[in-house]
Amino acid sequence: MTQDTAKKIQRASLLMVASIFLSRILGFLREWVLARTVGASEMADVYLASFTIPDFLNYLMAAGALNISLIPVLASYVGRENEEKGKEVYQTLSTILSAGMLVLVLVCQVFSETLASWVAPGFSVEQHDKLTHLMRLILPAQFFFFWGGMANGVQQTHGFFSYSAFAPLLYNLSIVTIGILLYPSLGVSSFSLGVLVGAFLGYGLL
């Protein structure tokens, strides 16, 4: 290992440690704000339930499909110093997976009322309607998570870790900020909107 490589690894490690520390603080702040505003109410149950289907999509595509197919393949080409071929494979796989993710999000949007009944069959009509609304706000965020996962995979393959460091910070900061500012007018929906904006800023745009 050369001295430059060692320094690069050290800087990346320090960046990730600092990012994890700040992300934990923002995550704690996010939960504290939720507790202070929404509390242990029926709407809190609705808010938590609204993540069930979106989180499943995230696990299925943004985490599972990328880790199993895209990132290892790209890393293998970079390791063999055949980056041009790696780019071709990346473009093909990313197009197929992106189309699949888009279709899944759209299908879940269309059938969100039915999915809400499956997720929480015991909810009242008011809770069910709110759950459907929150799910529709959060579902598009999964596409940004997916794109972010692809960008993160490419950057890590080339030894860059700044994306992994800053994306969660922007995500949590958006939830906290938008939740606080818009809660008086939007209620619990403000936090779901914060999820969508945070996913766009932290994972789709960064």
Image (tube, rainbow, N blue to C red):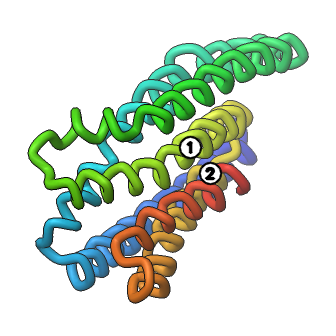
Residue appearing at x 57%, y 14% in the figure:
69
Asked whether the viewer can see residue 154, the reply is yes
Horizontal side, residue 130 vs residue 36: left or right: right
- Are dots 1 and 2 in contact, CB under 8 Å? yes
Residue pictured at 58% horizontal, 27% vertical: 101
Residue 77, image quadrant? top right
Query: Could you say which is closer to the camera, residue 163 or residue 118?
Result: 118
Dot 1 falls on a residue whose secondary structure is helix
Q: Nearer the viewer, residue 47 or 169?
A: 47
Query: Mark 2 or mark 1, which is nearer the start of the sequence?
Result: 1
From the image, which quarter does the C terminus lie in?
Answer: bottom right
- Where does the image place residue 85, in percent across and percent down from the top left? 85, 11
Marking on residue 203: 2
On residue 145, the disc is 1
* Cα distance in 3D space between marks 1 and 2: 6 Å
**Residue positioned 65% across, 13% down in the render:** 73
Quadrant into which the N terminus falls:
top right
Circle 2: is it few (<14), some (14-19), or many (20+) Cα within 10 Å?
Answer: many
Q: Residues within 10 Å of mark 1 (few under 14, many from 20)?
A: many
Q: Which structural element holds mark 2?
A: helix
Q: Position of residue 114 (x, y in %)?
A: 32, 33
Amino acid type, mark 2: Tyr
Amino acid type at image mark 1 = Phe
